[in-house]
Image (cartoon, rainbow, N blue to C red):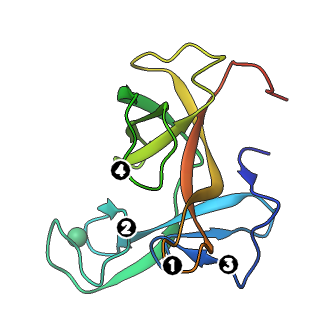
Amino acid sequence: MAGRVHPAYDESSRLVVDGSIRVAEDGAPALVGTECNDCGFVVFPRRSFCRNCLSETVADVDLSREGELRTYTVAHTGQEGFEPPYAFGFVHLPEGVRLYSLIEGWESATMAVGAPVELTLDEITRDPRTDEPLFGHKFRLLGGDGDD
Ligand SMILES: [Zn+2]
């Protein structure tokens, strides 16, 4: 089973982007995108119409849990709410979706263009007003320490 869900996450948890990720029936995380029923175009995050052909005949679709790292960097100075150093980059999914993500496991795995990554549902940051955790997607490099 690909993908991990943070143990503190449950149905009452807040997401950074509402409706962007869910726990699937098999217990693994699933990014929720939109697929066009007319042209097949897939997009993330969800939209009410197709960005490719403007059709409004679209439906939610679970995206692949594994993808490929295409660009990355390690931040050594922190944006507020993020403890440096941390890695982020763009991940490409088989559906043609490209998304920005924090990258986990870069300390112990080889971070390179083309490296395989898998989805995790994790705490992203905390609400600065309430200190409540905010959850969302990250991708973890495969092939490092801690792999099953
Ligand atoms: Zn379309």
Left or right of 71 on screen, residue 143:
right
Q: Which mark is residue 102?
A: none
Query: Alpha-carbon neighbours of circle 2 within 10 Å: few (<14), some, or many (≥20)?
Result: some
Q: CA distance from mark 4 to mark 1?
A: 17 Å
- x and y percentages locating residue 89 in the rendered image: 37, 36
Mark 4 = which residue? Answer: 97
Question: Quick one: label 2 or label 4, which is nearer the N terminus?
Answer: 2
Q: Is residue 84 above or below residue 57?
A: above
Residue at 36% in and 26% down = 73
Q: CA distance from mark 2 to mark 4?
A: 9 Å
Q: CA distance from mark 4 to mark 3?
A: 26 Å
- x and y percentages locating residue 144 in the rendered image: 70, 19
- Find out whether the residues at labels 1 and 2 contact each other: C-beta distance under 8 Å: yes
Amino acid type at circle 3 is Ser
Question: Quick one: label 4 or label 1, which is nearer the N terminus?
Answer: 1
Amino acid type at circle 4 is Val
State the quadrant of the N terminus: top right
Ligand 1 lies under 8 Å from the Cβ of mark 1: no
- Find out whether the residues at labels 4 and 1 contact each other: C-beta distance under 8 Å: no
Label 4: state its secondary structure: loop
Query: Alpha-carbon neighbours of circle 4 within 10 Å: few (<14), some, or many (≥20)?
Result: some
Q: Which mark is residue 45?
A: 2
